[in-house]
Image: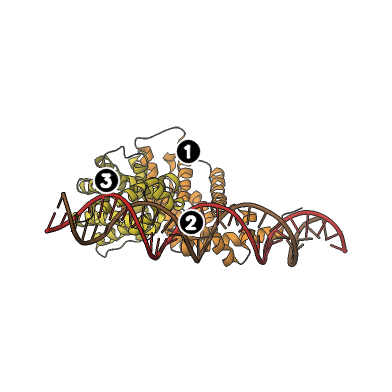
Chain colours: A orange, B yellow, C brown, D red
DNA sequence: AGAGTTAATCAACACAGTGTCTATTATAAG
DNA sequence: CTTATAATAGACACTGTGTTGATTAACTCT
């Protein structure tokens, strides 16, 4: 008794159309009616799979979150004092960007200006959690602000990458990010010496 | 024929309650019915002032945007090569934080996880526009990514400040931000030398 | 303080989308 | 081919929307 092909087909179509519609009219404005009409199946069918729009959103987001968590776990948590070591950070960062690229469509929509702000919040909390694990109990003065700064900066870069059609390779993005981390944006822009 | 006090009172109550409800149940879930019941006036009255929820949102956001633009204009646009000069940047940054504090309630709601992602997008575009004006046509390799990095980082810091109840003074925040800008988050955290 | 103006109220309206249901048809698994 | 179950189609009550018309209340200005 494997999983019915019909289910897989329907769910895939739902999620695909969902990303499309978020991009098109914004998450708020997407209705179940819209979605099912566009994907060309009965409205009732939607409710066979998800409770409502937010349930669909939730489950789609969680899939991504779980993927990221899996990468974090497989990479391990490096002590913050090693973060400036690009040779070590680079491969890890590449793995993340490769994963993001796989989910590019959905992420572009949900992290875009018409997307779901709570998803970014979830990602930030996840990243901060990872940093804290890596730090192993050590804290810094203004540590929370430094983390907010870093984490937001990274997400901003990812957003811009997604928004501009992921033209750079994951490797390039990883390099860019580690450089900006190490030297600060001003210096890596050549604005200070 | 000055402006009717009733109008001012109603609009203020609307906006105040709006921020409250966004915080409480999220922008998506806020209904005009909610809003007017909570603010204790007739639902029809709302439509005397705004077309719908999004019109209200739009106009509230624009007020803030205009305020920020005004500050930018009065401060002028410094060449990026001077941004590491904390003595010069500090007072400007302070002015911004003071303004943000005035609109703290609304901003906390609208920039929070249940807020409006398009507002952050507007702010980012505004900030990037300012940077470009200041740069006066000069560009950098990966300039767009560097700007995305910086602008997002700054907004992230602001968000965290709002979210934690604006405990630091505008001056302190300005200092923190300029430091992280200059040295990069790692260095200002003491993680590299 | 009083006349005129206009904001706010109240009730009613058709309309959109929701989430649930039942009976029926179509498609997949074994 | 049989059995199970996913998808369809239509109907249901419900909630919130945005507009309207008639009435009441509050403000402005002289």
Q: Distance from label 2 to label 1 (Cα)?
A: 28 Å
Residue linked to disc 1: A134
Q: Position of residue B70 (x, y in %)?
A: 22, 56
Numbered disc 3: secondary structure: helix
**A2 sits left or right of B164 in the view:** right
* Residues at marks 2 and 3, CA–CA distance in whole angstroms: 30 Å
Ranked by sequence position, the earlier of labels 2 and 1 is 2
Q: Residues within 10 Å of mark 3 (few under 14, many from 20)?
A: few
Callout 2: SS: helix
- Mark 2, residue position: A110
Q: Nearer the viewer, residue A12 or B192?
A: A12
Residue A67 left/right relative to C8: right
Q: In front: B28, or A85?
A: B28
**Mark 2–mark 1 contact, CB under 8 Å?**
no
Most foreground residue, B9 or A7: B9
* Same-subunit check for callouts 1 and 3: no
Tell us which disc is closer to us: 2 or 1: 2
Q: Quadrant of residue A114?
A: bottom left
Q: Are marks 1 and 3 in contact (CB under 8 Å)?
A: no
The residue that appears at 27% across and 54% down in the rendered structure is: B7
**Residue at 39%, 59% in the rendered image:** B52
Q: CA distance from mark 1 to mark 3?
A: 37 Å
**Disc 3 target residue:** B102
Labels 2 and 1 within one chain = yes
């Amino acid at each position: 008794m494997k999983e019915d092909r019909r289910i897989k087909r329907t769910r895939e179509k739902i999620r695909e159309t969902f990303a499309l519609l978020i991009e098109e009219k914004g998450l708020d404005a997407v209705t179940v009616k819209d979605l099912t009409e566009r994907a060309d199946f009965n409205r009732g069918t939607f409710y066979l799979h998800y409770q409502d729009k937010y349930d669909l959103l939730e489950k789609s987001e969680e899939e991504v979150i779980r993927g990221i968590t899996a990468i974090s776990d497989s990479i391990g948590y490096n002590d913050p004092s090693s973060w400036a070591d690009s040779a070590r950070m680079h491969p890890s960062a590449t793995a993340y960007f490769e994963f993001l690229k796989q989910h590019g469509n959905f992420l572009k929509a949900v992290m875009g200006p018409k997307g779901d702000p709570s998803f970014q919040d979830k990602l930030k909390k996840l990243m901060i959690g990872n940093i804290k694990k890596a730090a192993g109990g050590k804290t810094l003065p203004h540590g929370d602000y430094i983390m907010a700064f870093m984490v937001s900066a990274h997400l901003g870069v990812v957003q811009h990458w997604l928004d501009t059609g992921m033209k750079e390779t994951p490797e390039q993005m990883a390099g860019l990010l580690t450089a900006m981390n190490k030297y600060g944006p001003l210096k890596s822009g050549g604005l200070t010496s």
